Image (tube, rainbow, N blue to C red):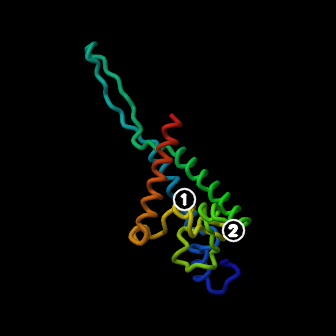
Amino acid sequence: MLASHSDKFQALYKVLFRHNLPNLLNLTATVLVFATVIYLQGFRVELPIKSARYRGQCSKYSIKLLYTGITPVIIHRVLVLYLYQASQIFYLIFGGNLLVDLLGVWSTVEDTQPSRLFFLEYRSGYYPSSGLCYYLSAIGSHPGSVIIDEPIRAIIYGTFMLCTMCFHLQNID
């Protein structure tokens, strides 16, 4: 885009903040979070342990400072994305059916205002506008305003996310 546009600042803005395709800001944030977690995962705290039975015997017990069990998050995210894909396919084929509409009604990106596009993780051009998939989708880019505007949705999403991650964490160990 920088090579093809005459206005370089507008082209740079589009590359950093575009909504319809992956952008560099999301990529940079992902790399920074990934690097930070990898760095913090290396920290350990060693606790000295003294034996009550044997005098003078000491040992150390190492504890990770940052325990990041990311597996439940990945499992949760994949299962929700599978639900989104199935709901989208059913909606495109059988749209108008009551059961399909309860699972999720999908709207196109062009039908909305840019402020309502959330994080636009829906690369297919559709996002859930009602139904179960709407309530299980991530809260918007301005969490305060969405929580105030839609507190029921925020509570349902938070409860669902915490419960599924706890369930997956319990089954992993």
Q: Residue furthest bottom?
A: 6
Which mark, residue 60? Answer: none
Horizontal arrangement in the rendering, residue 105 relative to residue 142 (left or right): right
Image spot of residue 123 (x, y percent): 65, 66
Query: What's the residue type where badge 1 is placed?
Result: Thr
Residue beneath the point at 43% across and 67% down: 143
Whether residue 52 is situated above or below residue 138 in the rendered picture = above
- Indicate the secondary structure of the residue bearing disc 2: loop
Query: What's the residue type where badge 2 is placed?
Result: Gly
Residue beneath the point at 54% across and 61% down: 137
Query: Which residue position is annotated with label 2?
Result: 95
Number of marks present in the image shown: 2
> Crowdedness of circle 2 by 10 Å Cα count: few (<14), some, many (20+)?
some
User: Disc 1 or 2, which lies upstream in sequence?
Assistant: 1
Between 2 and 135, the one lying in front of the other is: 135
Q: Nearer the viewer, mark 1 or mark 2?
A: 2
Between the residue at mark 1 and the residue at mark 2, the CA separation in whole angstroms equals 35 Å
Between 63 and 126, the one lying in front of the other is: 126
Q: Residue furthest right?
A: 93
Residue beneath the point at 42% across and 44% down: 66
> Crowdedness of circle 1 by 10 Å Cα count: few (<14), some, many (20+)?
few
Whether residue 45 is situated above or below residue 107 in the rendered picture = above
Image spot of residue 81 (x, y percent): 62, 56
Residue 106, located in which quarter of the rendered image? bottom right
Q: Residue furthest top?
A: 54
Query: Which residue position is annotated with label 1?
Result: 30
Horizontal arrangement in the rendering, residue 4 relative to residue 69 (left or right): right
Q: Quadrant of the N terminus?
A: bottom right
Image spot of residue 146 (x, y percent): 44, 70
Residue 88, located in which quarter of the rendered image? bottom right
Residue beneath the point at 44% across and 70% down: 142
Horizontal arrangement in the rendering, residue 155 relative to residue 113 (left or right): left
